[in-house]
Amino acid sequence: MTREDLYRQITLKKSMLCVGLDVDYAKMPEHIKSLSTSEIAVKGKLYGGKTRSVIEFNKAIIDATAQYCVAYKPNLAFYESYGTDGLRALEVTVDYIRTTYPDMFLIADAKRGDIGNTARMYAKAFFESMDFDAVTLSPYMGQDSIQPFLDYKGKWAIVLALTSNQSAVQFQLAEKDGKPLYRAVMEEMMSVSTPDNMMFVVGATKAEKLKEIRTFCPDNFLLVPGVGAQGGSAEEVIKYGANDKGGLLINSSRGILYADSTPDFAKAAARVAASTARIQ
């Protein structure tokens, strides 16, 4: 998906919302968890156990929120933690989004970062085998760990810059050559990429930094987690971080997924999604 395609969806839906599909079986409504005792057929294959529950939960959330968001972001850890059951559920979820909502931007929140030959295999996995539009990456090992993802036309590298967790300050705000490390990382990554294939992660809990970031990074999209359960303000993020091509994907995960634990959980998710990251 190109930057123009993504901006077109933002304009059409008047939304910068990305729904994080961080699926925790323990937090699912009981009636969804109970489905694990039976099987469901999807394209000729049978799925049971936790795989079925995750599939059913995801499909309900996706159908309820698709009109209010422009992107979905499964966090790989929440699927890998269930072994093959989780990976099967992820595969079905990605296929469902691609088939039912083909204009949706799809992010693999994997935070990979390894040497060049390994990075090439990660890029192949996420962009070819799994058909994601983008993948989150750690830049700690330098340019050669990021370049293989940039080699895919129409795909995106999303590099960690200034994250929303408390201990991020231990490294990301440390100075390098008179500037904070996160800025040095962003500027280096910008020098080997374009705004058409590179985004950066900047946490919503650091909203006051967005105005400063836009002085040296005016054009790139920013993926902004931390809205909702982590306390970040979507309004402040849009105020300080938006640009003339949208420029933001504002993520909310737990606040939408677990807005309600009753059989009406999908309706509650839709209500929260409808009021999050809306633009005029």
Image: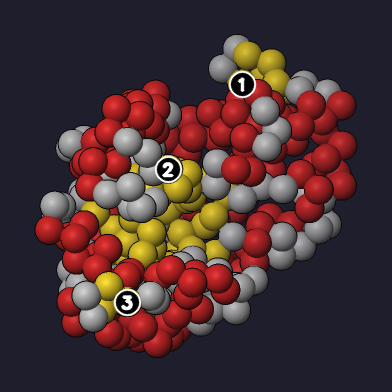
x and y, in percent, of residue 5 in the image: 23, 52
In the rendered structure, which amino acid carries the disc numbered 1?
Val
Is disc 2 in contact with disc 1, using a CB cutoff of under 8 Å? no
Q: 92 and 177: which one is in front? A: 177
Disc 3 on helix, strand or loop?
strand
| Residue 195 appears in the figure | no
| Residue 45 appears in the figure | yes
| Pointer 2 local density, CA inside 10 Å: few below 14, some 14–19, many at least 20 | some
Q: Quadrant of the N terminus?
A: top left
x and y, in percent, of residue 267 in the image: 68, 60
In the image, farthest residue toward the top: 44
| Pointer 1 local density, CA inside 10 Å: few below 14, some 14–19, many at least 20 | few
Quick check: 253 left or right of 1?
right
Quadrant in the picture for residue 152: top left
Q: Image height check: is 29 above or below 225?
A: above
| Pointer 3 local density, CA inside 10 Å: few below 14, some 14–19, many at least 20 | few
